Image: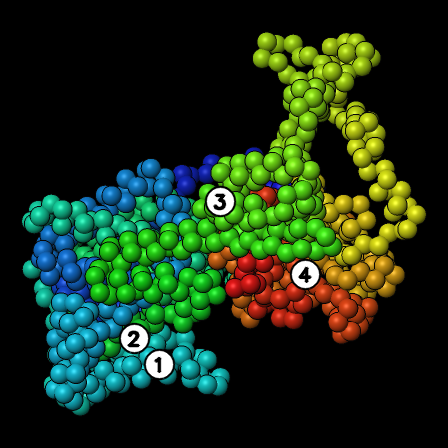
Amino acid sequence: MTLYAPARTTSRPRIQRPHSPPEGPRRFRFPLAGADLSASVAVFLIALPLSLGIALATGAPLQSGLVAAAVGGLVAGRFGGSPLQVSGPAAGLTVVTAELIQRYGWRTTCAITVLAGLTQLALSALRVARSALAVSPAIVHGMLAGIGVTIALAQLHIVLGGTPQSSAVDNALGLPAQLARAHPATLTISALTVAVLLCWPRLPGRAGRLVRKVPAALVAVAGATAVAAFTGLAVPRVDLPSWSSHALPGLPEGPVLGIAAGVLTITLVTSVQSLLSAVAVDKLVATRADHGKGVPRSRLDRELAGQGAANVVSGALGGLPVAGVAVRSVANVSAGAVSRASTMLHGLWIVLAALLLVPVLDLIPLAALAALVMVVGIQMVSITHIRTVTRHREVVVYAVTLAGVVLVGILEGVALGIAVAIAVALHRLARTRITREERDGRQLLRVRGQLTFLAVPRLSRALHQLPQGSDVVVELDGSFMDHAAYEALSDWTTGHLAHGGTVETTGPTGVRIAEPAPVTASAAHPCCRPWTPWHNHQCGEAQPSENGPETTGPETTGAEASGPETSRPTTGLHLASGIGKFQRNTAPLVREELARLAREGQRPSQLFLTCADSRLVTSMITSSGPGDLFTVRNVGNLVPLPGEESGDDSVAAAIEYAVEVLRVSSITVCGHSGCGAMQALLSGSPDDPPTPLRRWLRHGRPSLERMASRRHAWARISGRLPADAVEQLCLTNVVQQLEHLRAYESVARRLAEGTLTLHGVYFHVGEAQAYLLSGTDEVHSYDDVFTQVVPTDQLETARAS
């Protein structure tokens, strides 16, 4: 069942009073909310010192950082596809830009920035923005960490009063000598800046909460500037030259291949960083108290075009390369911005500061800016990212990418990371465990992992070691078998059967895998195959013909074919037709099993609570048969807290019956993608009329609150974040309903006894993939367990490792 939120009327026809004067022409008004104004000021206060610091770190004219910040706010903010993302000079581009300036000069670097922007515009026209999201997170995190290490090593020399070298290796080797001749005044200013940056966000108490609203970067730089001014310390300071002498781009000068590599590097880093940041901003907006109401989701191709336009303008005006910046974007969202007006206003404030505050900016010590950028570089080596890649067994990819970026370069480091990621994927694909044992006089051959041509030699060796004429069970635990493996298994099976043996092929749960249908059945019904889509499919009924009229199948009776109106079953006859097929085809096969269940009664092993959505076929996704599951379905797979069903105790009664009477050993809550109930929850409003559907969906409000809470981690599906707010809510809802289950007295008692376990499952309809909570069978901490969701076909491998 698919649910849709009721449509709302957003505008009314304007009624002209009979005697009122005619309306004049409408005047254009720039929509500006108070939240956007305050957010723009907060972002401006962060962006101003960071832009100067990044320009200093690259060796570019300091004004270029202000140009890039202003263009990022005004151009990318206006034309980009992520309304709340803030763009400007990014720390991730520092190493690339510094290398280009050193090799080709500033004017050629500006031209390279323009060419990179044009390349981004071309890629946007090809609509390839989402392809950038296919890069492994381990590679992206490793690239950013490598850039952060390189930045920190270079800025540490300036912090100590020296000059950085051309490479990270040289900077590391030169540190001992630089420490020996550290400049006391510069070191004092730098230490003060670092101390404020680290301590300001940790100020305790109510007063601390109030002052923490002022950005730490601004306080650190302003404090260091004030100390340097009042004490008269002799330290180098910012020196903004006149705008009349500002350098503009020139024609690229240098080897074509080198310039092309520079364009490619700028394009790659700015595009990937901006697109990943846009996705992260969407997630952050969805967790706000207002759930991002009125803020459209990011359009990645348009965002790529906006970044391209910003780079073209920034390079043409003599600015640094522009990219979406996570720090400023987070500040923008946290400050409550609701439209792109906040981003554009921040760019306007940068322009005014660059024109009017030059005397104030000239007082800033360079050591303070270097210390600020050094801390930013260190923070790019995120402990959270390291834990994530460790949990996903991708530390090698992360480490190789980081080392490659530091030792060789960004493009080379990313290429090395991609190569290692491919090698790791191939290793996992080829990692197949084959074991053999004898049980109850039968030979059991277990195959764990994917069966590809790489595993065929070991599979063939294990199969031919089985005694001829024996009874064999081949247990396949994997989601993929290629043609070579299928042929090897099929040929051996034919030979083993010819020598008087038996072969039974099962899945990981022992469920027998059906053999292909006989040729006669296939010939009788050419439209039917094991993979025939079941949607509106009527085997043996009238099938459309390319020649025009429809012809009836071999099972069509004379009455069914008597007229054109009955050549295809109408919607009203689908149910009766299906029942008839069950009686003819399926009932003879399951009659014996159902007779046994009728004699012995039902003894299901688990209670399966899922949504009433018609696309969720519980027996199909769980490979279960009659008597295996005690199934409860409702809109949104909700478990109302005890005493809150208000007259309808159907779910509570089913839980009590399953736990107390049937004595099930587990309870599973299964959510699914595209859930209409979750969509209705997200789009609902307290002012909606109290229809039966809305009254029932109130049991899902705790899931909404949980998703908006900062105390709970975001769920990840096989390493990726959910695609949108609906998928995030579907996942969160499963976790919340598991908590509701624990509130039931019978469930809590059985859990305490250790005779009952709880499970969460998420079924992605479009991918036909079921995901299971990873970690442990008994769910103790839902946040810890459900932050990683793995495909069920990988669960055994994940546990074994």
Looking at marks 2 and 4 on the same chain, the residue that comes earlier in the sequence is marked by: 2
Looking at marks 2 and 1 on the same chain, the residue that comes earlier in the sequence is marked by: 1
* x and y, in percent, of residue 142 in the image: 34, 63
* x and y, in percent, of residue 161 in the image: 14, 81
Q: Look at mark 2 in the image and give the residue it sits on.
A: 375
Structural crowding at the residue carrying mark 2, measured as other residues with C-alpha within 10 Å and reported as few (<14), some (14–19) or many (≥20): some
| SS of the residue under disc 4 | strand
193 horizontally vs 6: left or right = left
Type of the residue with mark 2: Val
How many numbered callouts?
Answer: 4
Which mark is in front, 4 or 3? 3
* Location of residue 504 (image quadrant): top right
Q: Quick check: 174 above or below 458?
A: below
204 horizontally vs 604: left or right = left
Q: Look at mark 1 in the image and give the residue it sits on.
A: 198
Looking at marks 1 and 3 on the same chain, the residue that comes earlier in the sequence is marked by: 1
Looking at marks 1 and 4 on the same chain, the residue that comes earlier in the sequence is marked by: 1
Residue 511 or residue 489, whichever sits in front: 489
Type of the residue with mark 1: Leu
Q: Quick check: 572 above or below 198?
A: above
Q: Are marks 2 and 1 in contact (CB under 8 Å)?
A: yes
Q: Quick check: 572 above or below 343?
A: above
Which mark is in front, 1 or 4? 4
Q: Quadrant of the N terminus?
A: top right
Looking at marks 2 and 3 on the same chain, the residue that comes earlier in the sequence is marked by: 2
Q: Look at mark 3 in the image and give the residue it sits on.
A: 456
Which mark is in front, 1 or 3? 3
Structural crowding at the residue carrying mark 3, measured as other residues with C-alpha within 10 Å and reported as few (<14), some (14–19) or many (≥20): some
